[in-house]
Image (tube, grey):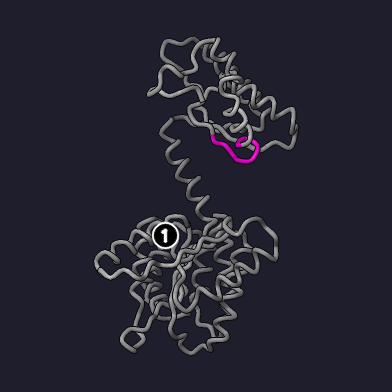
Amino acid sequence: MHGDVEHPAQVVLTKDDYERYPIDRGAFINGLTGDLVSKTFLFLGFSFKDPNLDYILARIRLTFQANGRQHYCVFRRVQEQAGQSQAEYEYLQIKQRLAINDLKRFNIKTLLVDSYDEITELLRRIERTYRRKTLFISGSAEEFGAWDKSDVSEFLNDLGKIVIQRGFRLVSGFGWGISNDLLSGAIEQIYGQRIGHIQDHLIVRPFPRYIADVGVRDALWHEFRKDLISQAGIALFMFGNKLSDGKTVLADGVRKEYAIARELDLVTVPVAPTGYVANELWQLDEPGVKSSAMSEEIKQAFARLQAPAAKPQELLSRISEILDLLGKE
């Protein structure tokens, strides 16, 4: 906003620079105003003593009054210093309280921390909460065990709708045998609810398959998977089989996606009743779920999800329960 150390001649520094700011950098004011109206800001390391920002915030407050966007900032709580008088310490406390109250006029809430080290953990929690609203679904299926294909198609279609209804963004790598029905339900729900642009709710990227060199393809697919999964906070695993040399075998791609999800610290949710790799992954997950810091309510929901199901439709309410609990944890 006030320049860059790499371009010292353009730095906003003097009183004249500030007075000329609307003329020299008017486009920046307009751009920042638009962002402050449409996005949520977290201010870190900012004193709010800058006249340019003060002008922008005041203009927004007068325009939108009580309907302005909610923003946040982090301050370190006033610390009592060695050799400081009690009166000086109390003065600084009062000054900080007044600054916090003044920021409320601009819809800026303040969080006080005792140490700047706390900010790192705070940012991790914000990222985790944000990612928890994005669901990655992994799976492939050449066959569906004892279930009828039409029942599975209906189940997947309904699941796609439920994911959108619950306010999740859906991420998928177009798994063989499941994605068409899943994405059809999601898209139908997005357009039915008229809830914004499809790209706000759905990320679908088919794998680049026609790469002759197997080593190059495997390396590319790993990066492709990692980039896709990194956008989510929850990973759901279903089925996990494929056709190889005329035989149905377990899908190694689903195993790889599970390993990446664990590496990226996603909450992994294998749906064991769908069988194949998903059942195998639940055997790996179950001990961790039982001993984890998850609430007892979530652990019980996991247990209910893994119970056998005569028809796939029985899983819809169980998956919905898990998503609701994890989405608000």
Q: Count numbered badges in the picture.
A: 1
Residue at image x 25%, y 68%?
A: 213
Give the image location of residue 175, x and y in percent: 45, 73
Q: Which residue is mark 1?
A: 292
Of helix, strand and loop, which one carries label 1? loop
Q: Nearer the viewer, residue 219 or 112?
A: 219
- Is residue 270 visible in this depiction of the protein? no
Is 97 located above or below residue 171 in the figure? above
- Report the residue at 50% width, 79% height from top: 307
Query: What's the amino acid at mark 1?
Result: Ser
Frontmost residue, 47 versus 93: 47
- Please tell me which residue is depicted at 41% across the width and 34% down the height of the picture: 117
The quadrant of the image that shows the C terminus is bottom right
Instruction: Say left or right for 130 vs 68.
Output: left
* Residue 285: in magenta span: no
Q: Which residues are magenta?
A: 35-42
Return the residue nearer the eye: 171 or 74. 171
**Residue 244 location in percent, x, y?**
33, 84
In the image: residue 155, left or right of residue 225: right
Residue 4: percent from left, percent from top: 42, 24
Can residue 24 be seen here? The reply is yes
Label 1 crowding class (10 Å Cα cut-off): few <14, some 14-19, many 20+? few
The residue under the point 63% across, 20% down is 98
Residue 151's spot in the image, x, y percent?
57, 85
